[in-house]
Amino acid sequence: MYRGRFAPSPTGELHAGSLVAALASYLDARAHQGEWWVRMEDIDGPRCVPGADQTILQQLQRCGLQWDGDIAYQSQRNSLYQHALDQLLTQGLVYPCGCTRKEIEESQALLGQNLERHKAAVYSGTCRNGLQGKSARAWRFNVQAWSAKRGSPWVHWTDQRLGAQTHNVLDEVGDFGLKRADGLWAYQLAVVVDDAAQGISHVVRGQDLTDNTARQILLQEALDLPQPAYTHTPLVLGTNGEKLSKQNGAKALDLSTEVAVCQAMNQAAIALGLDTRSATMNSLAERPTVLAFWTAQWAQREATKIGA
Ligand SMILES: [Zn+2]
């Protein structure tokens, strides 16, 4: 059975980019006669805004995107994440790390590697063999040990839109964090545990998350969890060419009037390459019929892709 999900962080209202991600995962689920669930990724407590979850849900409903099942909140799923971490600890695949961000960047510079803008430093495994008297700041997944166990550091997977993908997590990321000493769970672990616990069969999300997938696949393997199918959708870029996000000041969606809702939905459909000339949303009453038409178009496109 197909079960997809839209997983926003309740750090503010939806913007044009997040509506595109929501619409893509909705249409993909409906095109497969599947379920579409919503999960609030609110593990990063300090960044979350009280009430933003309700606002997001109201925005989805206003756009005609009705979900199935109950809304899951990551902040209420601590014990699930802890259970997974314990499983990895038992296998000897997790170790405490005492390095500061500065120390990690310095050790990378020593290795002669330059740090690209907006890219986290590769962790070179400094604490793999013990803390050397430092106190633990985080728990890391031992990518080196798991790579040895599975026989290769290379992860091969297929994106339904972007095609074959290959990543070497050990070289590109290194041993990555699962939990901070202050109790904050890492996105990678929470997502993997939730997708499996909720029975998510298909992940449809923004292209900026593509390179997270290999890390998540390694965790799925080590935790013996099923691997969902992945589709990464095109990003909506701001005028500065960067991905729209709340961090770079993307404006909240204007859904205040009927015209504004239709405009936002038509624009999201265009961003996904749908033909809105033959099915344009012109009124709230038209939401179900237009969404059904876009779903059929999406299904048609999927069918040609499989046939190709
Ligand atoms: Zn360390």
Image: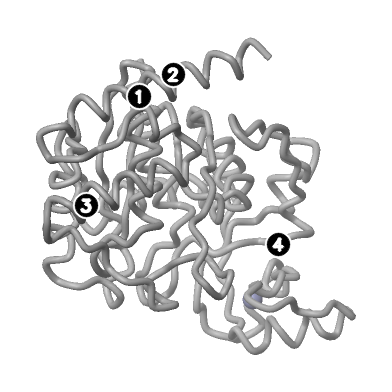
Among the 4 quarters of the image, the one containing residue 280? top left
Q: Mark 2 touching mark 1, by CB under 8 A? A: yes
Residue in the picture at 75% in, 70% down: 124
**Nearest to N terminus: mark 2 or mark 3:** 3
The secondary structure type at the circle numbered 2 is helix
- Quadrant in the picture for the C terminus: top right
Kind of residue at badge 4: Gly
Which residue lies under the disc numbered 1? 295
Q: Mark 2 touching mark 3, by CB under 8 A? A: no
Kind of residue at badge 1: Thr
Which residue lies under the disc numbered 3? 73
Residue in the picture at 71% in, 70% down: 122
How dense is the environment of label 1, judged by Cα within 10 Å: few (below 14), some, or many (20 and up)? many
Closest to the camera, between mark 2 and mark 4, is 2
Which residue lies under the disc numbered 4? 174
The secondary structure type at the circle numbered 4 is loop
Q: Nearer the viewer, residue 190 or 163?
A: 163
Residue in the picture at 37% in, 31% down: 200
Q: CA distance from mark 2 to mark 1?
A: 6 Å
Among the 4 quarters of the image, the one containing residue 126? bottom right
